[in-house]
Image: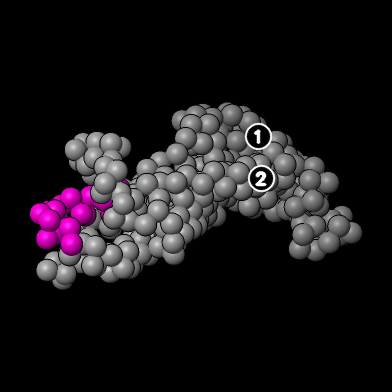
């Protein structure tokens, strides 16, 4: 949309506006479709932005954490655990390392085996939580040293878990962007149909205007202005309802689940303000194309 087009939309023309009925089926359809699509676009944007944050958080948390598993008999487990902790304390890039208590290990296994699992009677390995600092540590070098000094020690840096999760979050972000594009295309299609219907209903009026010297550009501007403003009003209402709905979603602090924190954060709350403007732009482009095609057919 050029600056001249924007000035024409804002200034308007009272005589030209009379070409397009101020109410009716096409008016209500344009406003409703714009509002519904803007409402859906807000949720698609929320999903896309939240997926990006989720991918970054998962990548950061899993990249900084690792688990050292020590499989040994009960009489050797404590000695090997102390030796492993000593090695980890000497390893550059390891911020902290601690042996998990039996209660913590039981809590990890509870979702699969139940809360009454008797760990004392089972050969459950000792788990050591390892947290890396900023630069991180040499995982391969640490594995070689542990395998040489601590029999049965296995270092898991969560790579096999991190990569699928990050890819899944990235796919959700792509899906959100694709959904916004699809919503825009659907909105353009519906407004194009509404514009065609409005032009067809006023075919006789258009013929009279041509007889008195009105240019097609003058006639098209009237329809572009009406449909663009209707789309802007409908999209603004849908955007407001969408933002209100997103605000009602559970925040990340309310519960520790996958579907928490799916709203906007910080400056991200300003992103939905672009939805009405984009909706108006889509309506303007769709109406201009429809008006040109219809006016050519009416010649």
Give the mark, 1 or 2, whose residue is nearer the N terminus.
1
Range of residues picked out in magenta:
208-225
Q: Position of residue 29 (x, y in %)?
A: 44, 62
Q: Is residue 212 magenta?
A: yes
Q: Position of residue 26 (x, y in %)?
A: 40, 62
Taking the image as shown, residue 241 lies to the left or right of residue 209, namely right
Q: Which mark is residue 293?
A: none
Q: Position of residue 121 (x, y in %)?
A: 87, 59
Residue at position x 47%, y 35% in the image: 270
Quadrant location of the N terminus in the rendered image? top left
In 3D space, how far apart are the residues under numbered discs 1 and 2 (Cα atoms)? 39 Å
Residue behind mark 2: 248
Residue at position x 29%, y 43% in the image: 14
Q: Main secondary structure of the magenta part?
A: helix
Quadrant location of the C terminus in the rendered image? bottom left
Residue behind mark 1: 97
């Amino acid at each position: 949309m050029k600056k001249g087009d924007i000035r024409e939309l804002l200034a308007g023309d009272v005589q030209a506006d009379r070409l397009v009925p101020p109410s009716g089926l096409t008016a209500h359809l344009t406003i409703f479709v714009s509002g519904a699509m803007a409402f859906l676009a807000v949720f698609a944007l929320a999903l896309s932005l939240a997926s990006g944050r989720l991918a970054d958080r998962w990548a950061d948390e899993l990249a900084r954490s690792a688990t050292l598993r020590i499989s040994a008999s009960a009489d050797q487990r404590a000695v090997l655990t102390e030796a492993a902790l000593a090695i980890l304390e000497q390893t550059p890039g390891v911020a902290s390392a601690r042996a998990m208590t039996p209660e913590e290990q039981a809590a990890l296994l509870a979702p699969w085996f139940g809360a009454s699992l008797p760990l004392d009677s089972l050969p459950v390995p000792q788990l050591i939580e390892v947290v890396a600092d900023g630069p991180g540590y040499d995982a391969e070098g640490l594995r070689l040293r542990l395998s040489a000094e601590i029999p049965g020690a296995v270092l898991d840096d969560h790579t096999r878990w991190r990569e699928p999760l990050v890819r899944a979050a990235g796919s959700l972000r792509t899906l959100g962007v694709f959904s916004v594009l699809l919503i825009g295309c659907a909105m353009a299609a519906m407004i194009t149909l509404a514009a065609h219907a409005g032009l067809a209903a006023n075919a006789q009026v258009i013929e009279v205007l041509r007889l008195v010297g009105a240019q097609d550009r003058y006639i098209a501007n009237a329809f572009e202005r009406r449909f663009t403003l209707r789309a802007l009003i409908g999209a603004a209402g849908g955007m407001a309802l969408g933002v209100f709905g997103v605000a009602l979603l559970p925040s990340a602090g309310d519960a520790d689940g996958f579907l928490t924190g799916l709203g906007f954060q910080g400056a991200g709350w300003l992103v939905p303000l672009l939805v009405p403007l984009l909706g108006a732009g889509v309506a303007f482009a769709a109406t201009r194309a429809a008006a040109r095609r219809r006016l050519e057919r009416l010649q």
